[in-house]
Each structure stands twice: as structure tokens, then as C-alpha cells.
Amino acid sequence: MIVYGVAMLSVCLILGMLIGESLGVALNVEANVGGVGIAMLFLVFASNSEKFKTLTQGVAGTGINFWSAMYIPIVVAMAARQNVAAAVDGGLLALLAGVAAVIVSFALVPVLSKIGGVTPGTESRDKEQGTA
Amino acid sequence: MDIVASVFVRNNLIVAFAVVGVTIWVSYFLADKLTQGRIHGSAIAIALGLVAAYFGGVATGGNTGVADIALLGGVGLMGGGMMRDFAIVATAFGVHLSELRKAGIAGVISIFAGVIVSFVVGAMIAVMFGYTDATAITTIGAGAVTYIVGPVTGEAIGASDAIITLSVAAGLVKSILVMIGTPLVARHIGLDNPQSAMVFGGLMGTTSGVAAGLAATDPKLVPYGAMTATFYTGVGCLLGPSILFFIVSSMF
């Protein structure tokens, strides 16, 4: 049943949101702390586990895959409802602050990605030797 | 005309599906014919969405872009937080646990590094523009983190409405630039594997920017980037009105 997969996905999101919301309250922050990320972890655990097979495999899985495939159209709709006019009206200060933050963050991606490469041990060194 | 309007308004979500579908078809057609596939179709679709949002905002004076036009109200629901989060979670289907473990530490570091770096850059720009009170500098810095962290921080430390609006604008610029810029710089910053996508999500943090930027780069990377990005705003809201504000106050 397709709806089993959709229901499974919904339960993951709701649980994640509840935990994220509670984390926010516990930390005294007016935000949902990682709710979506936690929900994603639940879905990853469920789809990697034997116990939830009936909810994630076969036809049930197509219910989840449908929403995964609707992701880009939803993102396009999300882009169309951004407050672009306000961003443009923010003037030079807002523009510079936003642009500079993005450029510096982009530049840090390769630097921090190396941390991930170092932890598993020799993997990254092997690669460097391979290219040398 | 009345009949058309009432049918469109009553079925607004369905209208949104159709409009977005046509937009994506046109975008993929343009990507194929005009750029020979060099620019991804979804990047063009997202850019078209942003352009439409600008004109929608200017025409109606509202703050949800195209969704403020009555006939296109469904775009607001389709692209709203609920559907966005639902679809983002769905992209995690099929992700392997081992990939997440590999980038775990780098992902966590990148969240804190991302919040602090964006904050410092935003705060420095505020100082360059002549702001000298700690509240305004902190709020603008927090805006450069995300457009949610800006107002949350500003309200917590008592910034003026004008400064809070400015911080939201800075966050919006960031989010939009990440959407457009990511596919263009992806190759140069090594954004082509799950690990760097997790670091990318943690550094950029704007969920909408990361979601759209990665979708236009390589949809397979979306779940990894989105996973870390969703923690970013929470960490920003945590650090902004507390440690970061204390540090700025001790300097100004």
C-alpha cells in the first residue's frame, strides 16, 4: 500500500519536529533545533532496518519516492514565494553583508571537507599519492 | 472572467502544481536548447521562480512573492515550510548510514564554523557602514547567518525595527545567492560528494538556499546538505543573542 510509505514518512517528520521543538524549548531558543534533520535520521534508520521492511519496500516505497521526486518542483514553488523584493530593497548594507557571508562560506567548503577526509585514516593520503 | 478566477482560487494548490510543472518544462527546454545542458534545468526554474517572486512582491506589496497574487495563492502552500520539510525528509530515503558517519564530525564543525563566520562577516560590514552600538551590529551579523536568526536575535536583545528589517534583508540576499551561486561554484569548491555536501549544508545553513542550490547542482546531494543545514538556524538562534552578543558588547 502506497499510503504506508507516506504515513511512515509523515510520522518521521512529526516525530522529528516534536523533538526539534522540544530541544528549542529546552535550550531556550525560539526555533526548531534540527527537527527536519532528526526526521531524516529516523527515515534513514527505518529504510536501513529489517523491521520496517513492509513500510519502506515495494509499493510502500514508491509513496516515499514520489515525495522525494516532488522535491525540486516544491523548491521551485518555494523560490517563487520568497520575499525577493524586500531583499532588493534592503540596500547596499544588506546586499554586502549577504554577499560577503556567502563568498567566505563558499571558500570554507573545501577547507572543512578535508576534515572528513582525514578521520577515516589513510584514505585521503592514498588519493594524494595516487595523483602525484 | 469571474468563473476562471473562482475556479483558480478554489483549486489553488492544483493550479500551483500545473504552473510549476509548466515552469519546469520551459526551464528544461531552455537549458537544453540555449545552454546545451551546461546550466541545469532546475537552476533555471529556480531563477525564474525568484524573478517571478520579485515581480509578484513589487506588484502586490506583500511579502510572499508570487503567492500574494490571488490566482497563484497555491504556490504559497506548495512552496511553504510544511511541504518543503516533507519533501526534504523524503530525499533521505535511500541514504546510507555509513555516508553520514563518515562526514559526522566535519558536519558538526561546519555548523558552528558557518554560524560564526557568517556572523563575523555581517558584523564587520555593519561596522564598516558606521554602526557603533552592539545591538545593531549583533542583529545585522545575525541576519547574515539566516533571515530567521536575524529577527530572533534582534528581538531578544532589543534592536529597532529598522535594524531587524535590514537583518532580514541580509539573510534573504544570502539565501537567494546560495540558490543561484551553488551550481556555478560547485565544481571549484569540490561539491560533488556526500561529505562535502554535508559540510556545505553546515556552512551555508539557509535551508531554502541549500535545498535549492543542491537541487540545481546534483539532486543526489540534497539529503546530505539538508541534514546539516536544518541544525544551523537552531545553533544560530542559540549563539546569536547569547555568546556572540556578549562578545560584541565587550568590544563596542
Image (tube, coloured by chain):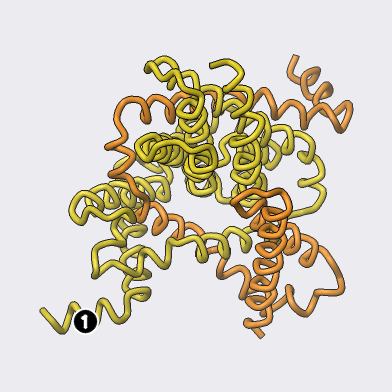
**Picture quarter with the C terminus of chain A:** top right
Q: Is residue B199 above or below residue B209?
A: above
Task: Name the subunit of mark 1.
Answer: B
B24 is higher (above) or lower (below) than B245: below
Circle 1: residue type:
Ser
Question: Percent from the top left, x then y, of residue A109?
Answer: 62, 28
Residue at the far left in the pictured view: B1
> Quick one: quadrant of the N terminus of chain A?
bottom right
Q: Nearer the viewer, residue B114 or B34?
A: B114
Q: Residue at x 59, y 29 (%)?
A: B245
Query: In this rendering, is residue B113 above or below B194?
Result: above
Q: Secondary structure at mark 1?
A: helix
In this picture, is A56 found above or below B113? below
- At 54% across and 30% down in the image, what residue appears? B187
How many callouts does the rendering have? 1
Q: Which chain is orange?
A: A
Q: Colour of chain B?
A: yellow
Q: Position of residue B54 (x, y in %)?
A: 27, 47
Q: Is residue B187 left or right of residue A73?
A: right
Please tell me which residue is depicted at 75% across the width and 34% down the height of the picture: B106
